[in-house]
Image (tube, rainbow, N blue to C red):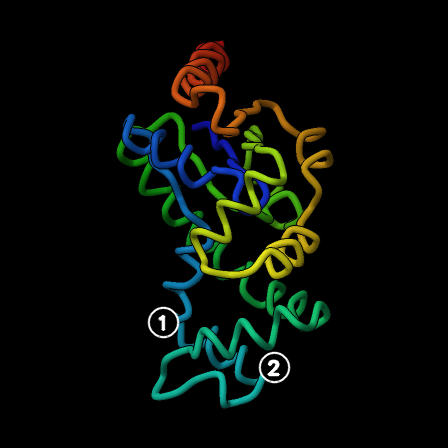
Amino acid sequence: MYTLACTGGIGSGKSYVCKVFSAMGIPVYYADERAKMLYHSESELLCELTTLLGDEIVSEGVLQKALFAKIIFSNPRLLNKVNEIVHPYVLKDFLAWKSECRQRGKSLIIIESAIILDVQIFRNCIDGILVVDAPIDVRIARVIKRDSVDERQVIERINRQMSSADMLSKADYIIFADGKRAVLPQICDVLKQLTTTLNC
């Protein structure tokens, strides 16, 4: 089974690209969404987070997402500590999901994550890297529209992520979701290359 990591900076269009892959029958693991599910299903995870950040981040057993985000995104040190706690839970969940896909006879799966290239424990789980890229002004406009935030907040988020240049330097495959080049033909081209790889 071939595991393709799909990544890209915020607003790059990676989620859209993954939805197209999914519509074509390729299983996609959305790491961010699954992590949010784990906040509800894994009581040990919540316990570890409250120990680090304080009991106020949980109310009636539910993570207070707005407060949680406010605390960690304003403090890089705490953000790193939270990631150190959360990532092993996500990895365990991903490996269980991957096993299910293998049992269903899938030969190609995708894990979508903005930060997977920064996370050491995932490196042995992926076989190839697909980077989705778009110009910075396009990304900023998309996030402002999507999240109802101002430009300054978007730029702060972008600056916390690996640069596009660094991501692209690690890519095995690249898709440009710049609003000018059609995405579907690029996806088909990547699939053609992957099919060749899988048949080798």
Q: Is residue 82 above or below residue 136?
A: below
Q: Quadrant of the N terminus?
A: top left
Residue at image location 43% in from the left, 52% down from the top: 146
Query: Residue 85: which numbered mark, if any?
Result: none
Q: Does 78 sit left or right of 197 as displayed?
A: right
Residues at marks 2 and 1 touching, judged by CB atoms closer than 8 Å: no
Kind of residue at disc 2: Leu
The location of residue 141, given as percent across then percent down, is 52, 45
Residue at image location 49% in from the left, 89% down from the top: 56
Look at mark 2 in the image and give the residue it sits on.
52
Q: Residues within 10 Å of mark 2 (few under 14, many from 20)?
A: few
Q: CA distance from mark 2 to mark 1?
A: 17 Å
Q: Residues within 10 Å of mark 1 (few under 14, many from 20)?
A: few
First in sequence, mark 2 or 1: give its number. 1
| Disc 2 secondary structure class | helix
| Disc 1 secondary structure class | helix
Residue at image location 59% in from the left, 43% down from the top: 9
Between 117 and 2, the one lying in front of the other is: 117
Look at mark 1 in the image and give the residue it sits on.
40
Q: Does 71 sit left or right of 185 as displayed?
A: right
Q: Does 120 sit left or right of 50 as displayed?
A: right
Residue at image location 37% in from the left, 80% down from the top: 62
The location of residue 123, given as percent across then percent down, is 62, 41
Locate residue 70: give its quadrant: bottom right
Locate residue 152: give its quadrant: bottom right
Q: Is residue 198 above or below residue 130?
A: above
Between 178 and 105, the one lying in front of the other is: 178
The location of residue 198, given as percent across then percent down, is 45, 16
Between 70 and 3, the one lying in front of the other is: 70
